[in-house]
Amino acid sequence: MSIFSNQALKNEHALITGATGGIGAATAKTLAGMRAAVTITGRNEEKLENVAEDIRSTHPDANICKQLADLGKDSDRETLVEQAEKACGPITLLVNNAGIAGGSTVDELTKDKLESIMDINYTSTVLLTQLVYKKMLKKKRGAIVNVSSLSGLRGTHGNTAYAGSKFALIGFTQSMAVEAIEHGIRVNAVCPGWVDTAMGQQSVENKAARTGTSVEELLQSSVPSGRMSEPEEVANTIAFLLTDAAANIVGESVKISGGTVMR
Protein backbone atom coordinates (compact mmCIF):
# COMPACT_ATOMS: atom_id res chain seq x y z
CA MET A 1 0.00 0.00 0.00
CA SER A 2 1.39 3.36 -1.02
CA ILE A 3 1.15 6.20 1.51
CA PHE A 4 2.62 8.78 -0.86
CA SER A 5 1.20 10.96 -3.59
CA ASN A 6 2.06 9.77 -7.07
CA GLN A 7 3.41 13.27 -7.68
CA ALA A 8 5.46 13.58 -4.48
CA LEU A 9 8.83 13.32 -6.23
CA LYS A 10 7.92 14.66 -9.66
CA ASN A 11 10.90 16.39 -11.34
CA GLU A 12 13.35 14.62 -9.02
CA HIS A 13 16.05 12.16 -10.09
CA ALA A 14 17.05 9.47 -7.62
CA LEU A 15 20.21 7.39 -7.86
CA ILE A 16 19.96 4.13 -5.94
CA THR A 17 22.97 1.91 -5.34
CA GLY A 18 22.67 -1.77 -4.49
CA ALA A 19 19.41 -1.70 -6.43
CA THR A 20 19.33 -5.43 -7.14
CA GLY A 21 18.96 -6.31 -3.43
CA GLY A 22 15.67 -6.43 -1.60
CA ILE A 23 15.80 -2.98 -0.02
CA GLY A 24 17.26 -1.32 -3.11
CA ALA A 25 14.69 -2.83 -5.47
CA ALA A 26 11.80 -1.95 -3.17
CA THR A 27 13.10 1.61 -2.85
CA ALA A 28 13.42 2.00 -6.62
CA LYS A 29 9.84 0.81 -7.09
CA THR A 30 8.52 3.12 -4.37
CA LEU A 31 10.29 6.20 -5.71
CA ALA A 32 9.21 5.45 -9.28
CA GLY A 33 5.64 5.33 -8.01
CA MET A 34 6.16 8.84 -6.62
CA ARG A 35 7.09 9.98 -10.15
CA ALA A 36 10.84 10.34 -9.60
CA ALA A 37 13.16 9.45 -12.43
CA VAL A 38 15.20 6.57 -11.05
CA THR A 39 18.69 5.36 -11.90
CA ILE A 40 19.39 1.89 -10.55
CA THR A 41 22.89 0.50 -10.32
CA GLY A 42 24.52 -2.76 -9.39
CA ARG A 43 27.04 -5.30 -10.64
CA ASN A 44 24.67 -7.79 -12.28
CA GLU A 45 23.05 -6.73 -15.56
CA GLU A 46 20.40 -9.45 -15.55
CA LYS A 47 19.26 -8.56 -12.03
CA LEU A 48 19.15 -4.86 -12.92
CA GLU A 49 16.94 -5.61 -15.91
CA ASN A 50 14.65 -7.75 -13.72
CA VAL A 51 14.25 -4.85 -11.27
CA ALA A 52 13.52 -2.45 -14.14
CA GLU A 53 10.93 -4.82 -15.63
CA ASP A 54 9.23 -5.26 -12.26
CA ILE A 55 8.96 -1.49 -11.85
CA ARG A 56 7.56 -1.03 -15.36
CA SER A 57 4.99 -3.77 -14.77
CA THR A 58 3.49 -1.62 -12.00
CA HIS A 59 4.42 1.82 -13.32
CA PRO A 60 4.47 1.60 -17.15
CA ASP A 61 5.40 5.26 -17.57
CA ALA A 62 8.30 5.14 -15.10
CA ASN A 63 11.55 6.78 -16.17
CA ILE A 64 14.09 4.09 -15.27
CA CYS A 65 17.76 4.15 -16.16
CA LYS A 66 20.13 1.22 -15.59
CA GLN A 67 23.88 1.47 -15.17
CA LEU A 68 26.30 -1.33 -14.34
CA ALA A 69 28.95 -0.21 -11.89
CA ASP A 70 31.54 -1.56 -9.48
CA LEU A 71 31.50 1.23 -6.91
CA GLY A 72 34.95 0.23 -5.69
CA LYS A 73 36.42 1.56 -8.95
CA ASP A 74 36.97 5.29 -9.43
CA SER A 75 36.21 5.09 -13.14
CA ASP A 76 32.91 3.24 -12.58
CA ARG A 77 31.72 5.79 -10.04
CA GLU A 78 32.52 8.66 -12.38
CA THR A 79 30.86 6.95 -15.34
CA LEU A 80 27.80 6.12 -13.25
CA VAL A 81 27.17 9.74 -12.29
CA GLU A 82 27.93 11.01 -15.78
CA GLN A 83 25.64 8.52 -17.54
CA ALA A 84 22.86 8.87 -14.98
CA GLU A 85 22.73 12.63 -15.43
CA LYS A 86 22.99 12.32 -19.19
CA ALA A 87 19.99 9.98 -19.26
CA CYS A 88 17.75 11.38 -16.53
CA GLY A 89 18.99 14.85 -15.67
CA PRO A 90 20.70 16.21 -12.55
CA ILE A 91 20.74 13.84 -9.58
CA THR A 92 18.73 15.41 -6.77
CA LEU A 93 18.25 12.34 -4.55
CA LEU A 94 20.83 9.71 -3.55
CA VAL A 95 20.18 6.43 -1.75
CA ASN A 96 23.40 4.73 -0.69
CA ASN A 97 22.19 1.16 -0.27
CA ALA A 98 25.09 -0.92 -1.65
CA GLY A 99 26.68 -3.10 0.98
CA ILE A 100 27.77 -6.58 1.96
CA ALA A 101 27.42 -8.57 5.15
CA GLY A 102 29.93 -10.90 6.69
CA GLY A 103 32.48 -10.98 9.40
CA SER A 104 33.89 -13.14 12.12
CA THR A 105 35.21 -12.89 15.63
CA VAL A 106 38.21 -10.59 16.01
CA ASP A 107 40.68 -13.45 16.42
CA GLU A 108 39.62 -14.92 13.05
CA LEU A 109 39.16 -11.69 11.08
CA THR A 110 41.46 -11.39 8.06
CA LYS A 111 42.85 -8.19 6.63
CA ASP A 112 41.34 -8.96 3.23
CA LYS A 113 37.85 -9.46 4.69
CA LEU A 114 38.10 -6.31 6.78
CA GLU A 115 39.25 -4.21 3.83
CA SER A 116 36.58 -5.65 1.52
CA ILE A 117 33.72 -4.86 3.90
CA MET A 118 35.00 -1.39 4.74
CA ASP A 119 35.61 -0.54 1.08
CA ILE A 120 32.16 -1.51 -0.13
CA ASN A 121 30.12 -0.44 2.88
CA TYR A 122 31.94 2.77 3.72
CA THR A 123 34.77 4.06 1.53
CA SER A 124 33.02 3.60 -1.82
CA THR A 125 29.86 5.15 -0.40
CA VAL A 126 31.73 8.25 0.75
CA LEU A 127 33.50 8.66 -2.59
CA LEU A 128 30.33 8.26 -4.65
CA THR A 129 28.50 10.67 -2.37
CA GLN A 130 31.29 13.19 -2.86
CA LEU A 131 30.78 13.10 -6.63
CA VAL A 132 27.02 13.54 -6.37
CA TYR A 133 27.27 16.15 -3.61
CA LYS A 134 29.46 18.39 -5.74
CA LYS A 135 26.71 18.34 -8.36
CA MET A 136 24.03 19.10 -5.77
CA LEU A 137 26.03 22.04 -4.42
CA LYS A 138 25.66 23.85 -7.72
CA LYS A 139 21.87 23.87 -7.35
CA LYS A 140 21.77 24.20 -3.54
CA ARG A 141 19.28 21.37 -3.16
CA GLY A 142 19.13 17.64 -2.69
CA ALA A 143 18.57 14.83 -0.21
CA ILE A 144 20.72 11.84 0.66
CA VAL A 145 19.81 8.72 2.62
CA ASN A 146 22.49 6.27 3.73
CA VAL A 147 21.38 2.73 4.51
CA SER A 148 23.18 1.78 7.69
CA SER A 149 21.94 -0.86 10.13
CA LEU A 150 21.17 -1.56 13.76
CA SER A 151 24.76 -2.84 13.61
CA GLY A 152 25.72 0.81 13.18
CA LEU A 153 24.24 1.53 16.60
CA ARG A 154 25.41 -1.40 18.71
CA GLY A 155 27.90 -4.22 18.45
CA THR A 156 27.07 -7.92 18.30
CA HIS A 157 29.02 -11.16 18.44
CA GLY A 158 31.18 -11.94 15.40
CA ASN A 159 30.24 -8.68 13.70
CA THR A 160 33.34 -6.51 14.09
CA ALA A 161 33.97 -5.65 10.44
CA TYR A 162 30.34 -5.16 9.43
CA ALA A 163 29.42 -3.19 12.54
CA GLY A 164 32.55 -1.08 12.15
CA SER A 165 31.56 -0.17 8.58
CA LYS A 166 28.02 0.72 9.60
CA PHE A 167 29.14 2.76 12.62
CA ALA A 168 31.42 4.63 10.23
CA LEU A 169 28.46 5.31 7.95
CA ILE A 170 26.54 6.86 10.85
CA GLY A 171 29.48 9.10 11.68
CA PHE A 172 29.71 10.13 8.03
CA THR A 173 25.98 10.83 7.91
CA GLN A 174 26.05 13.07 10.96
CA SER A 175 29.19 14.97 9.97
CA MET A 176 28.12 15.51 6.38
CA ALA A 177 24.62 16.52 7.48
CA VAL A 178 26.05 19.47 9.43
CA GLU A 179 27.99 20.64 6.37
CA ALA A 180 25.34 19.94 3.74
CA ILE A 181 22.35 21.61 5.40
CA GLU A 182 24.16 24.95 5.06
CA HIS A 183 23.62 24.49 1.32
CA GLY A 184 20.02 23.26 1.44
CA ILE A 185 20.96 19.58 1.19
CA ARG A 186 19.72 17.07 3.76
CA VAL A 187 21.55 13.92 4.81
CA ASN A 188 20.03 11.16 6.95
CA ALA A 189 20.38 7.44 7.55
CA VAL A 190 18.09 4.50 8.11
CA CYS A 191 19.06 1.65 10.39
CA PRO A 192 17.10 -1.52 9.61
CA GLY A 193 17.21 -4.53 11.84
CA TRP A 194 16.48 -7.91 10.32
CA VAL A 195 14.77 -7.41 6.97
CA ASP A 196 13.12 -10.18 4.96
CA THR A 197 15.74 -10.28 2.20
CA ALA A 198 18.33 -12.90 1.29
CA MET A 199 20.94 -11.08 3.39
CA GLY A 200 18.57 -10.69 6.32
CA GLN A 201 17.43 -14.30 6.22
CA GLN A 202 21.04 -15.48 6.23
CA SER A 203 21.85 -13.27 9.21
CA VAL A 204 18.96 -14.47 11.33
CA GLU A 205 19.61 -18.10 10.38
CA ASN A 206 23.26 -17.78 11.36
CA LYS A 207 22.35 -16.37 14.77
CA ALA A 208 19.69 -19.02 15.31
CA ALA A 209 22.23 -21.74 14.55
CA ARG A 210 24.85 -20.18 16.84
CA THR A 211 22.41 -19.86 19.74
CA GLY A 212 20.82 -23.26 19.23
CA THR A 213 17.31 -22.02 18.60
CA SER A 214 14.87 -21.84 15.72
CA VAL A 215 14.40 -18.75 13.56
CA GLU A 216 10.84 -18.40 14.85
CA GLU A 217 11.91 -18.63 18.49
CA LEU A 218 14.73 -16.15 17.90
CA LEU A 219 12.41 -13.58 16.34
CA GLN A 220 9.84 -13.96 19.10
CA SER A 221 12.45 -13.53 21.83
CA SER A 222 14.57 -10.80 20.19
CA VAL A 223 12.09 -8.60 18.31
CA PRO A 224 9.15 -7.11 20.23
CA SER A 225 7.01 -7.13 17.07
CA GLY A 226 7.90 -10.80 16.60
CA ARG A 227 8.86 -10.52 12.95
CA MET A 228 11.36 -9.26 10.42
CA SER A 229 10.73 -5.96 8.64
CA GLU A 230 9.62 -6.04 5.01
CA PRO A 231 11.79 -4.34 2.35
CA GLU A 232 8.84 -2.10 1.50
CA GLU A 233 8.74 -0.80 5.08
CA VAL A 234 12.34 0.29 4.81
CA ALA A 235 11.67 1.75 1.35
CA ASN A 236 8.76 3.80 2.70
CA THR A 237 10.98 5.26 5.42
CA ILE A 238 13.66 6.16 2.88
CA ALA A 239 11.03 7.71 0.61
CA PHE A 240 9.67 9.86 3.44
CA LEU A 241 13.16 11.15 4.27
CA LEU A 242 13.61 12.16 0.62
CA THR A 243 10.42 14.22 0.50
CA ASP A 244 9.79 17.80 1.57
CA ALA A 245 7.68 16.40 4.41
CA ALA A 246 11.01 15.66 6.12
CA ALA A 247 12.41 19.13 5.45
CA ASN A 248 13.71 19.65 9.00
CA ILE A 249 14.94 16.11 9.62
CA VAL A 250 18.72 16.39 9.44
CA GLY A 251 21.46 13.96 10.42
CA GLU A 252 19.08 11.42 11.92
CA SER A 253 19.45 7.64 12.10
CA VAL A 254 15.96 6.20 11.81
CA LYS A 255 15.52 2.66 13.14
CA ILE A 256 13.22 0.15 11.44
CA SER A 257 13.50 -2.87 13.70
CA GLY A 258 10.19 -3.84 15.29
CA GLY A 259 11.40 -2.38 18.58
CA THR A 260 14.64 -4.36 18.78
CA VAL A 261 16.64 -1.26 19.77
CA MET A 262 14.97 1.63 21.57
CA ARG A 263 17.20 4.58 22.47
Image (spheres, rainbow, N blue to C red):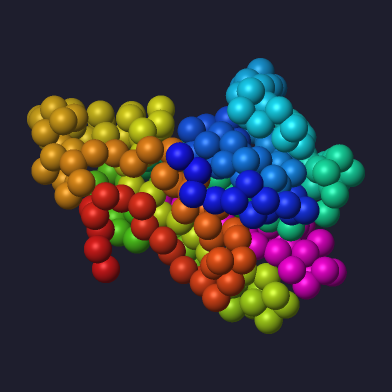
78 sits left or right of 86 in the view: left
147 in the magenta segment: yes
* Residue 127 place in picture, x, y as percent: 69, 55
Give the magenta range.
128-149
* Residue 248 place in picture, x, y as percent: 55, 75
Q: Is there any visible trace of residue 239 in the rendered image?
A: yes
Q: Quadrant of the C terminus?
A: bottom left
Q: Quadrant of residue 244?
A: bottom right
Q: Is there any visible trace of residue 147 in the rendered image?
A: no
Count of marks overlaid on the render:
0
Residue drawn at x 54%, y 60% is: 241
The residue closer to the viewer here, 60 or 25, is 60
* Residue 212 place in picture, x, y as percent: 10, 30
Q: Is residue 86 above or below residue 57?
A: below
Residue drawn at x 23%, y 53% is: 260
Q: Is residue 165 above or below residue 27?
A: below
* Residue 225 place in picture, x, y as percent: 20, 46
The residue closer to the viewer here, 258 or 253, is 258
Q: Is residue 128 above or below residue 245?
A: above
Residue drawn at x 44%, y 46% is: 234
155 sits left or right of 148 in the view: left
Residue drawn at x 34%, y 41% is: 229
228 sits left or right of 129 in the view: left
Q: Quadrant of residue 201?
A: top left
Q: Is residue 172 above or below residue 87?
A: below
237 in the magenta segment: no
The residue closer to the viewer here, 218 or 69, is 218
